[in-house]
Image (tube, rainbow, N blue to C red):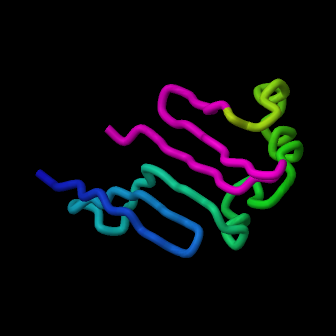
Amino acid sequence: GYTATRKTLYFDGLELGVIEFSNDPARLMVTHADITNAKWNHLLPFKIRQPVSVARAVLGEFAKDDAYLSRTYASESDSLQFRTSGGRLVGVSYSCYSG
């Protein structure tokens, strides 16, 4: 057998949840990510501090009626949530099912 260990890694403006597997030490499974600093903008199509309207355009038709991006955008296995302030994106949270 093997073990799976859940860990949370903290960086300035980025929290990353991962699972490590004892049978494959080079493998990490991402369980969640919370981004609040623009220095991590290269990691995703949404940019911290961008106008909400720009983030809505990236989401397309799904977000056309979500003026403040207050909905949770989800599928069976993952979800995406936004935090906004003053008409700008200030946080993006991603989580996925990890068993």
Quadrant position of residue 62: top right
The percent position of residue 33, horizontal first and vertical second, equals 52, 55
- Quadrant location of the C terminus in the rendered image: top left
| 62 over 19 or under it: above or below | above
Q: Check residue 46 for magenta coloring.
A: no
Outermost residue on the front side: it is 86
Left or right of 91 in this view: 7: left
- Residue drawn at (51%, 74%), measured in percent from left and top? 11
The percent position of residue 73, horizontal first and vertical second, equals 63, 32
Q: Check residue 84 for magenta coloring.
A: yes
| 97 over 49 or under it: above or below | above
| 31 over 15 or under it: above or below | above
Q: What kind of secondary structure does the magenta stretch mostly adopt?
A: strand
The percent position of residue 41, horizontal first and vertical second, equals 72, 64
- Residue drawn at (59%, 69%), measured in percent from left and top? 13
Quadrant position of residue 67: top right
- Residue drawn at (73%, 48%), measured in percent from left and top? 84
The percent position of residue 58, horizontal first and vertical second, equals 82, 42
Quadrant position of residue 7: bottom left
Left or right of 94 in this view: 62: right
Left or right of 82 in this view: 55: right
Query: Which residues are the magenta region?
Result: 71-99
Q: How many marks?
A: 0
